Image (tube, rainbow, N blue to C red):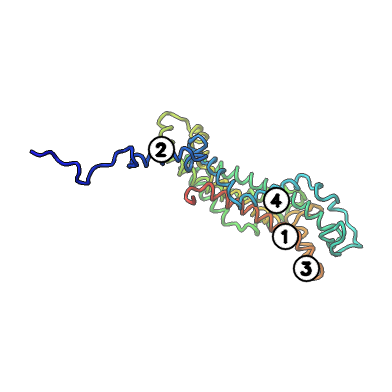
Amino acid sequence: MPEPSHDDGRAIAPTGAGGTMDLATSEAETLEKVPGGPLGTGPAGKPRSLWSDAWHDLRRNPVFIVAALVILFLVIISIWPSLIASGNPLDCDLAKAQQGSQPGHPFGFDGQGCDVYTRTVYGARTSVTVGVCATLGVALLGSVLGGLAGFFGGASDSLLSRLTDVFFAIPVVLGGLVLLSVVTSNTVWPVIGFMVLLGWPQISRIARGSVITAKQNDYVQAARALGASSSRLLLRHITPNAVAPVIVVATIALGTYISLEATLSYLGVGLRPPTVSWGIDISAASPYIRNAPHMLLWPAGALAVTVLAFIMLGDAVRDALDPKLR
């Protein structure tokens, strides 16, 4: 019987001469030589965590960089306003009331003869303080209540759901008019307390949903089967994987709280003189918008830029932390 021929054109290419194995090996070697490794890996080829991967994306996002620089500038002038404003925001001269820009006073003067530039700079301290403190209070209270309710479920979860429905039914501005109208304090703490009181339900629902989703993952079930306590499950396994949505919502809400403080101050129930606030200055300047528009434009512009910066920061953080948007 004749032996089968090997010259029929169906010979298999050797694995050392450009065949399939050589192609795969070449691709693997190329990936190993790429700085930082393949997508989602670190410099040594090790997989990156969610937070390191998010930071890797944020550093290359121009929206995040611009928003972060604006917010950093606002924080610096909030802590040390005298760096760029040497005057006193409460020093006024009625002889200069409603006058426009002058040497040393680039933003002009308000209706009481106060320097608009100095008041705009010092107003950043109030707005940033209210926004940051309110956001921290809302995030802490809402995360604890929502996380515990989502983890344990049962009657506590039902009670929290009904309680959040009650708070969601209260209009924020109307609630501020009612609750803050009886407060006589000139400090920022009543306004912060009001924002925390009406703001925690939103964070609570976000935290509850994140915890319910996280506790159904296999690694949580495995830790529970190994005898992990409830506190260990919450602190070590669930919280690190459920906190990302809370951070995103809280970052965006920070700008909302700043604008809410300005709104309440504009209506006369938030901060009150002699406290320096953008909302107070906008309220005082609104009757003179035709004769002296500079009194309104500068504090209103500073408020708009600040709120926009925090919203842009929140959007960038959301894009970095949400795997579905990659």
Of all residues shown, which one is farthest toward the right? 95
Question: Looking at the picture, which amino acid does disc 3 mark?
Answer: Ile
Q: Mark 3 or mark 2, which has the lower sequence index? A: 2
Disc 1 from disc 4: Cα separation? 22 Å
Q: Mark 4 or mark 3, which has the lower sequence index? A: 4
How far across and how far down the image is residue 5, in percent? 16, 41
Residue nearest the observer in this picture, 129 or 121? 121
Residue nearest the observer in this picture, 77 or 194? 77
Q: Quickly name the residue at label 1.
A: 301
How far across and how far down the image is residue 161, in percent? 51, 49
Q: Nearer the viewer, mark 4 or mark 3?
A: 3
Q: Nearer the viewer, mark 2 or mark 1?
A: 1
Q: Secondary structure at mark 2?
A: helix
Q: Quadrant of the N terminus?
A: top left
Q: Quickly name the residue at label 4.
A: 191
Question: Looking at the picture, which amino acid does disc 4 mark?
Answer: Val
Q: Residue at x 50, y 32 (%)?
A: 232
Question: Looking at the picture, which amino acid does disc 1 mark?
Answer: Gly
Above or below for 73 versus 105:
above
Is residue 171 shown left or right of residue 283? left
Q: Which mark is residue 218?
A: 2
Disc 4 from disc 2: Cα separation? 43 Å
